[in-house]
Image (cartoon, rainbow, N blue to C red):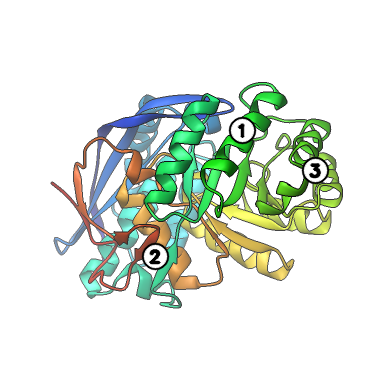
């Protein structure tokens, strides 16, 4: 028995250098939650919840309230039985994945720090480094062009472009400007479930020959519109990723069976770590590719996700860039970043992130 003796949560507010705009809304400050878990031998670990109301409907206030209610579920449990604890969390708070992710992260961080084991090694140690894309948020044509030019200067070769906040013609103009400003960049388009299949196909068609530079179209249609996802996949001539449609392992299996996607975007924040492991298994069984992503997270959860993807290996698409949007850094440690390259092999124990 290795009992959990304490679970504490506090707001973690970090201003962003650029408002993080997606089709569903804009976030100007990361209103996250920092969780600390302590074990009976004094070992402790940190976790982060990053609720994004425009995506999941979760708020910081709701997350703090959920974590308060989960304390009774957590304290006194044997920390070594972490998957059993994760299942209990899913049953107790099914609508609060960000809170559950924070608890699972803190729990595994504590266990791995106690063992002198990095999370990257815990998850398998397959790949020591990853190459992330850089997100270009919603905005004007001029803003898109400037951001693309700067991304090229900063050595990012894949740009993830948020679309769907306005008319299709506006997005086409933004994409043309991005392609001009970053002539060698590959593009991932991310509609965050905002388009119809017809609009998604019209957008791709308007790109003409430049469609070939689009390497992935992430969640073009609404979460429940698998027929629309399939249409874009079959007629758009670009691979399609499921994000909002892929919230658990069961949904991944359905996507594979319906041939509605080529790639699954795994986000620890939308399901927790235990379920994310099951999602990877379901995706691989269905022959689907893997992407690792996140919400608007600090280096704490981004490093956890990097350890997850690097440890398991086989993730073709990496979207772990949101620490670059933070105006300040209230945390220290985690992965080492040089340009687009993230290296996790130097982490000594847990995720290696600490509170400043």
Q: Which residue is mark 3?
A: 226
**Which residue occupies the foreground of this view, 138 or 120?**
138
Q: Name above or below for residue 141 compared with residue 208.
A: above
Marks 3 and 2 close (CB-CB < 8 Å): no
Left or right placement of residue 187 versus residue 18 in this view:
right
Q: Which residue is mark 1?
A: 163
**In this view of the protein, can residue 1 be seen by the observer?**
no
Q: Quadrant of residue 43?
A: bottom left
Picture coordinates of residue 27, whole percent (x, y): 42, 26
Q: Quadrant of residue 184?
A: bottom right
**In this view of the protein, can residue 104 be seen by the observer?**
yes
| Residue at (65, 24) in percent of width and height | 170
Marks 1 and 3 close (CB-CB < 8 Å): no
Cα–Cα span, label 2 and label 1: 29 Å
Q: Which residue is mark 2?
A: 307
Lower sequence index among marks 1 and 3:
1
Q: Which structural element holds mark 2?
A: helix
Lower sequence index among marks 2 and 1:
1
Q: Which structural element holds mark 3?
A: helix
| Residue at (63, 43) in percent of width and height | 189
């Amino acid at each position: 028995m290795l009992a959990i003796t304490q679970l504490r949560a506090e707001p973690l507010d970090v201003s962003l250098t650029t408002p993080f705009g997606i089709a569903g809304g804009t976030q100007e400050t990361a209103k996250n939650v920092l969780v600390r878990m302590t074990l009976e031998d004094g070992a402790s670990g940190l976790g982060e919840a990053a609720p994004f109301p425009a995506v999941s409907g979760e708020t910081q206030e709701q997350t703090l309230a959920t974590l308060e209610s989960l304390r009774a579920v957590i304290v006194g449990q044997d920390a070594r039985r972490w998957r059993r604890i994760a299942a209990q969390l899913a049953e107790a708070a099914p609508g609060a994945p960000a809170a559950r992710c924070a608890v699972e992260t803190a729990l595994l961080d504590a266990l791995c720090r106690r063992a002198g084991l990095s999370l990257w090694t815990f998850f398998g140690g397959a790949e020591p480094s990853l190459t992330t894309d850089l997100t270009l948020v919603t905005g004007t044509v001029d803003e898109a062009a400037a951001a693309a030019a700067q991304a090229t200067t900063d050595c990012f070769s894949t740009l993830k472009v948020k679309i769907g906040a306005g008319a299709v013609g506006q997005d086409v103009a933004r994409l043309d400007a991005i392609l001009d400003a970053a002539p060698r960049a590959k593009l991932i388009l991310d509609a965050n479930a905002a388009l119809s299949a017809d609009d998604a196909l019209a957008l791709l068609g308007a790109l003409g020959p430049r469609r070939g530079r689009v390497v992935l179209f992430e969640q073009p249609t609404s979460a429940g519109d698998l027929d629309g996802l399939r249409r874009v996949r079959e007629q758009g001539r670009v691979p399609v990723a499921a994000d909002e449609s892929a919230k658990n392992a069961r949904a991944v299996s359905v996507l594979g069976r319906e041939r509605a996607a080529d790639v699954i975007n795994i986000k620890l924040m939308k399901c927790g770590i235990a379920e994310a492991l099951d999602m990877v298994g379901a995706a691989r069984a269905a022959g689907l590719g893997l992407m690792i992503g996140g919400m608007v997270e600090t280096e704490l959860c981004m490093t956890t996700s990097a350890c997850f993807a690097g440890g398991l290996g086989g993730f073709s698409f990496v979207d772990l860039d949101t620490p670059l949007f933070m105006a300040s850094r209230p945390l220290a440690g985690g992965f080492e970043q040089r340009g687009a390259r993230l290296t996790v092999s130097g982490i000594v124990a847990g995720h290696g992130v600490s509170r400043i």
